[in-house]
Image (spheres, coloured by chain):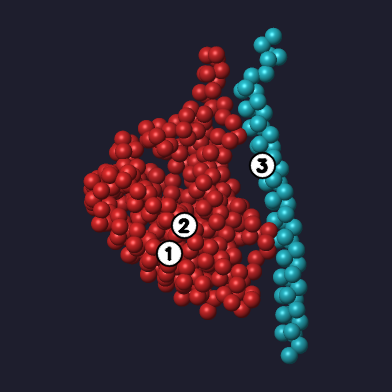
Chain colours: A cyan, B red
Amino acid sequence: MAFDVEHELHKRRLGRNVGLGLVLLAFVALVFGLTVVKVLNMGDAEAAASAKTVQVAKP
Amino acid sequence: MPDAHIIDQTGEAGFGDYVALLKPRVMSLVVFTALVGVLVAPGTVHPFVAMTSILFIALGAGASGALNMWWDADIDVIMKRTAKRPIPAGKVQPREALGFGLALSGIAVVMLALAANLLAAALLAFTIFFYAVVYSMWLKRSTPQNIVIGGAAGAFPPMIGWVAVTGSVSVEAVLMFMLIFMWTPPHFWALALFMNEDYSKAGVPMLTVTHGKKVTRNHILVYTIALVPFAIGAGFTSIGGPVYLAVSALLNAGFLWGAWRIWRRDEVQAEADSYAVEKQVFKFSLLYLFLHFGAFLAEAALKPYGLGGW
């Protein structure tokens, strides 16, 4: 049957799908990493802001 | 196999064809200049944020490349240099390239806004608009000054990198912009002098086609002279220093000498040695830009040891 024969086209399609899959995985990892960094920095910024507030409160 | 041929022509592109739509060679230059913009900027940013910012600046540049290929498919098929691009080669459908370019533009701008700041994202959006609409759709086919103004699109990445870190535009960012902006015309006109036939076949009004090669030679000299103050001037700002100034002085002397050699030649001389000088100057111009940004980087790298900068 013709369906069993793997054409060069199928290889190309597979390559495209695997490529897209990897790009999407990398994008998920990137957004996750960015979120972690932003949240951790937010903690630093809050700590710095509260330290400032304490300093202002104590003349 | 006629069936396979038909399928081949209806957009069954491989992964590499989509990568080719992003103009990876142009992207590598964008990555380099944006990286320099990020690294020489004062202030600190988390390395992951810096990497993400550079990635999305490059993706934005790539997306504008895809939009450019969508718009220019009709002339790309005529020019030998561009005939193998995915759209003229029949691997990617023009509408697919348009969708790809628009989607990636949106992703790149939104992600840069999230990773860095709104100003950097707005500058990236403007760069994509400038390259795809102002340069590709409007200037490229209507004026021989196309690359002078269009060069701005290539000049934005280091400025965006700088803004991603600092959140504002400063004189250093403007000078990095001007360095690429003023370098672009002599660089491309040197190329156009020995690639003339391709442009005239496609009907692109390159200066060499509309005003002739003598005028182009004059323009190369004038624009190279105009470039020098910006290149040297950057050496006196916070991103410059003795190393940069020394490198810049040598490179500018070399570029001026090359431009003068191009200027004093006529077509008979150029054709006799197959445009040897023009080709040399074109190659040197690539080195010129690379080493200028390398020198900015060197100054930034030496600073922690008390050696870089002023």
- Chain under callout 2: B
Q: Which residue is mark 2?
A: B287
Q: Residue at x 34, y 63 (%)?
A: B256
The Cα atoms of the two marked residues, 1 and 2, are separated by: 9 Å
Q: Residue at x 69, y 40 (%)?
A: A22
Q: Nearer the viewer, residue B154 or A49?
A: B154
Residue density around tag 1, few if under 14, some if 14–19, many if 20 or more, within 10 Å: many
What amino acid is labelled 3 in the image?
Val
Q: Residue at x 56, y 54 (%)?
A: B31
Kindly tell me whether residue B142 is visible in this rendering.
no
Q: Which mark is residue B251?
A: 1
- In the picture, measured across the screen, residue B282 lies left or right of residue B295, that is left
The Cα atoms of the two marked residues, 3 and 1, are separated by: 40 Å
Q: Which residue is mark 3?
A: A23
Q: Quadrant of the N terminus of chain B?
A: top right
The Cα atoms of the two marked residues, 2 and 3, are separated by: 32 Å
Dividing the picture into quadrants, the one containing residue B281 is bottom left
Q: x%, y% of residue B113?
A: 59, 57
What amino acid is labelled 1 in the image?
Leu
Dividing the picture into quadrants, the one containing residue B116 is bottom right
- Chain under callout 3: A
Residue density around tag 3, few if under 14, some if 14–19, many if 20 or more, within 10 Å: few
Q: Which mark is residue B146?
A: none
